[in-house]
Amino acid sequence: MQVSVQDVVSTVKNSFNFSVDKFPLSGPDGMRTPWYALFRSDNFEPVGNGSVTSRYVPHQTDDVIALVEAAHEAFDGEIDLNCHFRDGHYVTVAPTKGERRAIFGTADNIFPRVIIRAGYDGKAFSATMGYYRDACRNLAMLRSVNEASVSIRHTSGLRDKMDDLLSTFQTLKQSWATLADVVVELQNREVRMVDFLDQVYGQPDANSKRGVTVHKNRTEAIFKRLARERFQTGRGQFDDSFTVSAWEAFNAVQGYVQHDATRKKNFAGDFDRIILAAKDQKVIAAEKIVMDLIAV
């Protein structure tokens, strides 16, 4: 479906209908300090993990709109949006379903998802070409595919740089073919799942009852997820060696972290889990292991 630029702007504005403002921090008895903090204008909750300096200029919703408008034009207007705020603005851009790539048969497919991140941690904005795997509802990124991620300078007034932004997102669009080819390579490599999990998680301390229990429960949860996904995608049951494709192995760990792992209660929903899974050290380790298999 063709989505108008007006619809894109309206979606982002309605999702981020607040500003992020900078206020000075005070010491005891109102003592002045050189530090400032960021707060949302709608609920006065603090934003970010620490203080900022007097020179820091927080970006606003208009800057995020400029990013999304550039993505909209680069993908020919055929996009859906999902917006989320967690110490910064996150937007997923879902291009047309015509970009589907079949990985195994007709039931294991991936679809492009561009994840735009505009945080308040002093790092550059980023846009990453990730994938959505319908067999397991995983939304993930492969950090090792260099072409699939771009940095965007963190400055205010991004609308004045639309030509550069459009060029950036057009380049990112072209990375989908590379990312999909990498996934196909991962499907064509095999790993023994038991060995793979040992590489990712190691073995628990035999003297720690809790450690052994946690390890056992996690392993069972990952294998249940893997077995379910193999059935859904028509791969059948495990063989005696529990050999699977590297693609399946990575998604089993990533899916466990995104969907099943126990989390604290201060999460707004699925998008928080997506963000945290992308940063999770075990997911990063799992990616490195499988990517090393196809490294030239």
Image (spheres, rainbow, N blue to C red):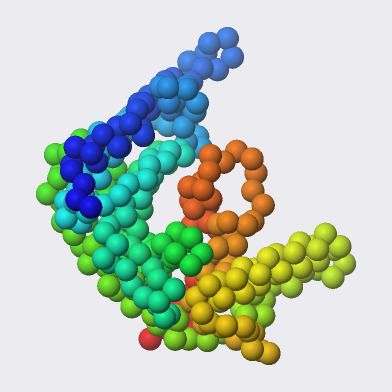
At which x and y percent is residue 206? 84, 70
Q: Determine the image quadrant of residue 147.
A: bottom left
**Residue 193 position by quadrant:** bottom right
Residue at x-position 44% and y-position 64%: 134
Image quadrant for the C terminus?
Answer: bottom left
Q: Residue furthest top?
A: 29
Q: Quadrant of residue 29?
A: top right
Q: Where is 89 relative to 55, above or below?
A: below
**In the image, is 167 to the left or to the right of 183?**
left
On the picture, is 18 further left or further right than 266? left
Q: Is residue 157 left or right of residue 20?
A: left
Please state which of residues 111 and 74 is positioned toward the viewer in this rendering. Answer: 111
Instruction: Residue at 53%, 72% (x, y): give it.
Output: 232
Foreground residue among 65 and 223: 223
- Tell me if I can see residue 56 in this picture: no
Query: Looking at the image, how many numbered discs can be counted on the residues?
Result: 0
Residue with the most extreme left position: 163
- Judge by depth and name the residue closer to the eye, 245 or 67: 245
Spot occupied by residue 100 in the image (x, y as percentages of width and height) = 32, 68
* Residue in view at x 67 percent, y 80 percent: 194
Where residue 201 appears, as percent x and y from the top left, is: 66, 69
Q: Give the answer, above or below, for where 30 lies relative to 89.
A: above
Residue under the image location 49 percent in, 53 percent down: 274
Residue 289 is situated, as x and y percent measured from the top left of the image, at 53, 76
Q: Can see residue 23?
A: yes
Specify the farthest residue to the bottom. 240
